[in-house]
Image (cartoon, rainbow, N blue to C red):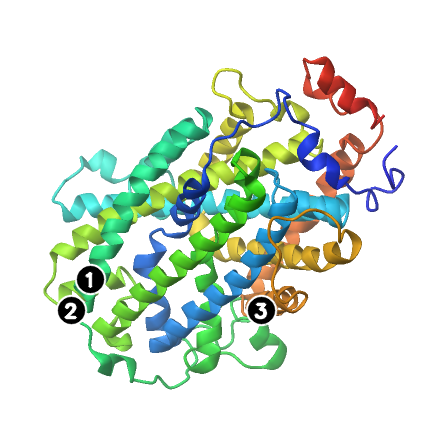
Amino acid sequence: MPEGTSLSILRRLPPTEVTNRWTGARHGLPKAYGRTDLVVLGVGVMIGAGIFSVAGRQAATMAGPGVILSFMIAGITSLLVAFCFAELSSAMPTSGSAYTFTYVIFGEVWAWLVGWALVMELLLATAVVARAWSLYAAQMLADLGVRLPDLLAKITGQAEGFDLFALFILVVLTAVVALGARVGLRTLWIIVVAKLLAVGAVIVVGATHFDQRNLSTIPVPATPAGTADDTLHSPLLGVLFGQTGAFGWFGIFAASAVITFAYIGFDIVATAAEEAEDAPRSIPKGIIRSLVITTIIYIAVALVMVGMTPYDKMSSKAPLANAFRQAEEGFMAHIINIGAVLGLTTVVLVLLVGLTRVMFALARDGLFPRSLAKINRTYHSPTRVTLLIGGVAILLAEFVPVLTLEPLVVIGTLFVFIAVAGGVIRMRRTMPDLPRGFRVPLSPGVPIASILACLWLLVNLEVITWLYFAAWMAFGVLVYLLYGRRNSVLAGARPAAAPLGAESRGVEGRGRHRR
């Protein structure tokens, strides 16, 4: 019987079982990703439409030219956490990522909470980005002079309500992911190369209109309209310490919390560990390299943006495209629209891949129905869970105003980041001899700095975001108590292999020692 079976909060997954227990089974994932593929996976999910809009919006409303510092702060915070992800994924290369790391290091209850936060983060992000894809696709067609029939125009490019484009992109990419990792990887390579060419064009052309005087305009700290007496929509830090407002250092840090959304995705590389070749070494490199590339690109675009147009003349809607129009480079608006559509396509694709792998791991451990942890014999992919995720994402995108819930993705991500950074510190103490392909430098300094940086970004999120997150996590605790606690493979009620429909004697044998 596993350690702490009577108390689920104490029972932990043995590290030796993380990668060995499913080898050769029907619920084991085939190898699909090489080292370069992992970098493309990370770049594919991190560089989306945000690169063309978030810098301008935050410069115009919150940070001014200081938005460049905001990108640096968010990038450095993400890099510190990336080191922690790199170490844990090199020691435990499995599709569960942060969820499985927590299961081994802290125990089942904490693992469930991290997994539940990951589900919220990735599922909501998928719906948000699909809706944003629709907006950009409709704008691209309009700018190209393509006029849709009135009937279609009413159900495309909408911020709320039924949207045909959002439905289309989710159906197509769910099918791509369901067909297997290799099909999705080929698609990802093509689109990532195309969108990087678009981003490169933006940087090169924008640099020719750079005016250094636009960087020297220092905005005076101010209170944004409509937030002075609105506690729910004020940053938690402002409510706690009586300080709020835009611009100045407060605005720079507040913008950093929002900009963190743009960096979300490097952690998804860790969910591909089970399918990666030489995972203990390739996964850390994929995580760190993709994040460094993305950070450099983001800062370059932000520098070009604030250098082209004074912050007080920026449009909060399509700021980069409008900046190029003011510079009489109107053709670049088409490049930006195409780049945004391509960028968001890869983001949705990789988010679906990452969420599929996390839920696959949760189901394989019994915390979700184990029937979802089946690999399709034809496509060598967890088709059942992929179709379920695609269906739920469609419902969210079509019937929930997801664009207003974007900060929930950030708070869920930062919660997971803190768990991973804390996991490195604890694993160094409790499992010092566990083989690792990468070690966090200057530990425990870097993990502690990661935790503090994430906490700082968290308190800069709005109060209402905290309330929504607390409600989601409370619901998660209820789900665990009613289902997960009794059905976990570590509960000892029945062998782990049998409910999963293991066909081979080898799989059954591996399940017996957990009776």
How far is mark 1 from mark 3, CA to CA?
33 Å
Q: How would you rate the neighbour count of disc 2 (Cα within 10 Å): few for under 14, some for 14-19, many for 20 or more?
A: few
Q: Amino acid at mark 1?
A: Val
Q: How would you rate the neighbour count of disc 3 (Cα within 10 Å): few for under 14, some for 14-19, many for 20 or more?
A: many
Quadrant of the rendering where the N terminus is positioned: top right
Name the residue carrying label 3.
453
Q: Residue at x 75, y 34 (%)?
A: 483
> In the rendered view, does 429 fall on the left or right side of 292?
right
Instruction: Estimate the x, y position of residue 25 in percent, counting from the top left.
Output: 64, 21
> In the rendered view, does 42 fall on the left or right side of 103?
left
Can you name the residue that lies furthest to the left here?
328
Residue 408 visible in rendering: yes
Nearest the eye: 339 or 310: 339
Name the residue carrying label 1.
204
Quadrant of the rendering where the C terminus is positioned: top right
* Mark 2 in CB contact with mark 1 (< 8 angstroms): yes
Q: Residue at x 58, y 81 (%)?
A: 242
Instruction: Estimate the x, y position of residue 239 in percent, counting from the top left.
Output: 59, 75
Q: Earlier in the sequence, mark 1 or mark 3?
A: 1
> In the rendered view, does 343 fall on the left or right side of 485?
left
Q: Residue at x 46, y 68 (%)?
A: 256
Residue 167 visible in rendering: no
Tag of residue 248? none
Q: Amino acid at mark 3?
A: Ala
Instruction: Estimate the x, y position of residue 315 in percent, counting from the top left.
Output: 26, 67
Tag of residue 208? 2
Q: State the SS at label 1.
A: helix
Q: Residue 217 occupies which quadrant of the picture? A: bottom left
Instruction: Estimate the x, y position of residue 423 in percent, counting from the top left.
Output: 69, 55
Nearest the eye: 259 or 241: 259
Q: State the SS at label 2.
A: loop
